[in-house]
Image: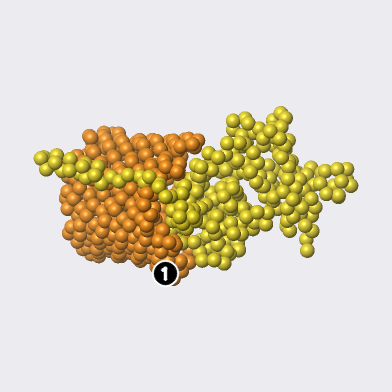
Chain colours: A orange, B yellow
Amino acid sequence: MIGRLSLFVPRCLFVVLCFAAFGARAEPYLAVQLGLKCGQCHVNPTGGGLRTTFGDIFSQTVLPAQHLDSPLDNWTGQLGQYLRTGGDLRFDASAMQAPNTRTVDQFAVQQMRLYAEADLIPNRLLAYVDEQVAPGGALNREAYLVYWSATHDWYLKAGQMYLPFGLRLQDQTAFIQTTTGINMTTPDQGVEFGWERGHWDAQFALSNGTAGGAVNSNGKQSSAQLIYVESVWRTGVAANYNAQSGGAKSAYGIFGGLRTGPISWLAQAEITDDQSIANKQGKQLATLLEGNWLIARGNNLKITHELFNPNRAVPNGEQTRWSLVYELTPIQFVQIRTGFRRNDGIPQDNAEHGRLYFVELHGYF
Amino acid sequence: MQIDRYGSWAALMLLAGAAGCAGNGQGLDQNGQPISMGGGSGGPTTADFQSIQDTVFTPICSKCHIGASAPEGLQLDAAHSYNFLVGVPSTEQPNLVRVKPSDPDNSYMVRKIEGLPGITGLQMPYMETPLSQATIDAIRQWIANGAPNAPAAAAKAQVFAVQATAPVDKATVKAPPAQILVTFTQEVDASLVNDTTVTLERIDSASAAAGGAKTMTAIARLAPMNPAVLLITPTTRLEPGAYRVTVRGTGGGALANMNAATLGADTSFEFTVEPAQ
């Protein structure tokens, strides 16, 4: 009976997904295309990392252009009654050019991450770990416990975690990720309270403010965001305040998404003020506008414009970045991304005029 | 469907309209800092080496870490910092490199500026306010990005030559160095690093009495993650006395860069190890 049920549930999910989410894809734009919250496809309610069973089935049956038949059931990461696992591998071939500089081309494993979730009390209490195992030695990214309310309308998380602040993009080098310093390379240790009810999502986190490093002051970092999700659009606001030694740093952001036919749009704007930097030079601005055109199932074309003002107190120093990325998911578990990123900035700095060409193999399970 | 179509066009126009342009750089120096403010120091640190040099190493660290007496032989002025950091084993904890590209957590410099448990000595900057978290994050990000050199610095390095040494020429050191560094302006061809191109000799009166300079056994190799840095490790502890390191840049099999350009001349430097107090 249990065996039949274990086959029945994924198949039902598959059917539901085929009708509800035809042709949708990964990252926040996927959520916009589907009209779902991040926690629908990821164990982490704020997105990223291990996929839920829904996310696993979706990524194998709806995401790829073609679903290769397998004698095995769809992968759901289930290892026994209490454990689930998953992972992501990103391997790049890239060439980076800048004026008057030798081109750097290389193969590189960007990351191999393994995720594990222990359902200690099913649907109520889980332990989660996100470990980067390559390149280099093992590096813990996230490790926390989450307690969910019986009705799943609030949760409490404690441990090391990514902080909530706007869109959680795959590209960790996006201006909106680096300006705040809040991204998936800088988890912090603390607690997070989440509230999910109807169209609303909210999180509040209190953490050390040291990005997982040693505590060097008594100040703490507070992060909060509030999101409203409709089926074709969403909007949210985020704030962060880090009472770090040497001067507080604050960040405020507004973000949203919109689906118009086959195109999903993402937008975010944020300002930061780092008072540890003298002469008001810590006031920065970063924006992102992105369109994702679902050309056909398994084929996505992404165009992104980013703006970064490294010093809002001084004019003429803005930097921009345009990205054109084509994403092909030919079969389940395999995605190939190829793209071009063009940076532009002040004429006198060659480093702000980089051109990046890349092909990336993304394996996921 | 009409809404979808119009919505797409509206969003596309919004994207085009909202897309800002890069600044023209008027009134700014090469680092994007106002010329009237002197430029360089004081700006927010970003995850590139030039920014870290201008906002951290030069104004803060090189107050001490400069010249022949730089602590731990670590020179952090603009001319030397990259090759003294990237891929170079720490003298305090030789099992860790100071900056390990793509791995900030295992980079000893990060542990020092974060003041993590297990470091030798004190958190850096020495006896000063710790770096802001934003600055540390930028340094971490630069390392996570592979710790690339500043394009401008790389562009300047047109001539293959010895850039710096540690110990510096004519230096007197109180303790025998476990490792001797020679940094170059460009990457070195590893196949040419051997005991005919890199020699360590004892040149003091004790060796003269024994018949002249005495060649010391030492292992020479390039730093694994920075082939512009030559690491020379004596196989035995250096006794008090005078020493000379020679890098052969002429003749067959001379040390050369990846384009087979040799140094063009032999380069030597000397240092003295003081007797223990």
Mark 1, secondary structure of its residue = loop
Q: Nearer the viewer, residue A286 or B26?
A: B26
Q: Position of residue B18 (x, y in %)?
A: 25, 46
For disc 1, the neighbor class at 10 Å (few under 14, some 14 to 19, many from 20) is some
> In the image, A188: left or right of B169?
left
Residue in the image at 14% along x and 41% along y? B6
User: Measured along the vertical axis of the image, is residue A341 above or below residue B131?
Assistant: above
Q: Position of residue B1 (x, y in %)?
A: 11, 40
Q: For mark 1, name the chain.
A: A
Q: Position of residue B119 (x, y in %)?
A: 57, 61
Q: Nearer the viewer, residue B50 or A185?
A: B50
* Residue under pointer 1: A219
Dot 1 amino acid type: Gly
Q: Based on the displayed image, in which of its 4 quarters is residue A187 positioned?
A: bottom left
Residue in the image at 44% along x and 71% along y? A218
Residue in the image at 60% along x and 40% along y? B185
Query: Where, quadrant-wise, is the C terminus of chain B in this rendering?
Result: bottom right
Residue in the image at 73% along x and 45% along y? B269
Q: Residue furthest left?
A: B2
Q: Based on the displayed image, in which of its 4 quarters is residue B265 positioned?
A: top right
